[in-house]
Amino acid sequence: MSGSERNKAFYVVAYDSPSDRRRTKIHKTLSGFGQWTQFSLFECHLTDKQYLQLRQRLDRHVKPEEDSIRFYPLCRGCTGKVETVGGQKPTDPVAIIV
């Protein structure tokens, strides 16, 4: 495991918005940072810097009085205990540069 991989934390991010437009923008923003696993739920492996970038980008689209985004950090030990029933188990994408 490389140093950058060790510095990543695993987050489950759940969101809800009554606005289709804002919900779509939240979804598109999260798509750039993690894997969509279920409706309104993403799993993200993020460095501290990526986490801050994600929060800043989401802040542009969220109305806190109407929308909700929840960030659940999971420790490395807890991540290994995640169980998936049905569907494909999400994985941390690995970039291969040639």
Image (cartoon, grey):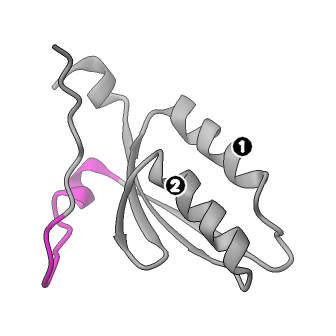
Residue appearing at x 21%, y 61% in the figure: 90
Residue appearing at x 20%, y 68% in the figure: 82
Q: Tell me which corner region of the image, top left, top right, bottom left or bottom right, holds residue 28.
A: bottom right
Any part of residue 68 in sight: no
- The picture places residue 94, in percent across and down from the top left corner, at 20, 35
Q: Nearer the viewer, residue 24 or 60?
A: 24
Q: Amino acid at mark 1?
A: Gln
Instruction: Look at mark 1 in the image and give the residue it sits on.
Output: 56
Q: Residue furthest top?
A: 98
Q: Main secondary structure of the magenta part?
A: loop
Q: Residues within 10 Å of mark 1 (few under 14, many from 20)?
A: few
Q: Nearer the viewer, residue 48 or 86?
A: 86
Q: Nearer the viewer, residue 38 or 83?
A: 38
- The picture places residue 64, in percent across and down from the top left corner, at 82, 70
**7 is higher (above) or lower (below) than 33:** above
Residue appearing at x 15%, y 78% in the figure: 87
Q: Which residues are magenta?
A: 75-89
- Using residue 9 as the reference point, say whether residue 62 is left or right of it: right
Comparing marks 2 and 1, which lies closer to the viewer?
2
- Using residue 40 as the reference point, say whether residue 69 is left or right of it: right
Quadrant containing the N terminus in the rendered view: top left
Instruction: Look at mark 2 in the image and give the residue it sits on.
Output: 30
The answer to if 26 sits in the magenta stretch is no
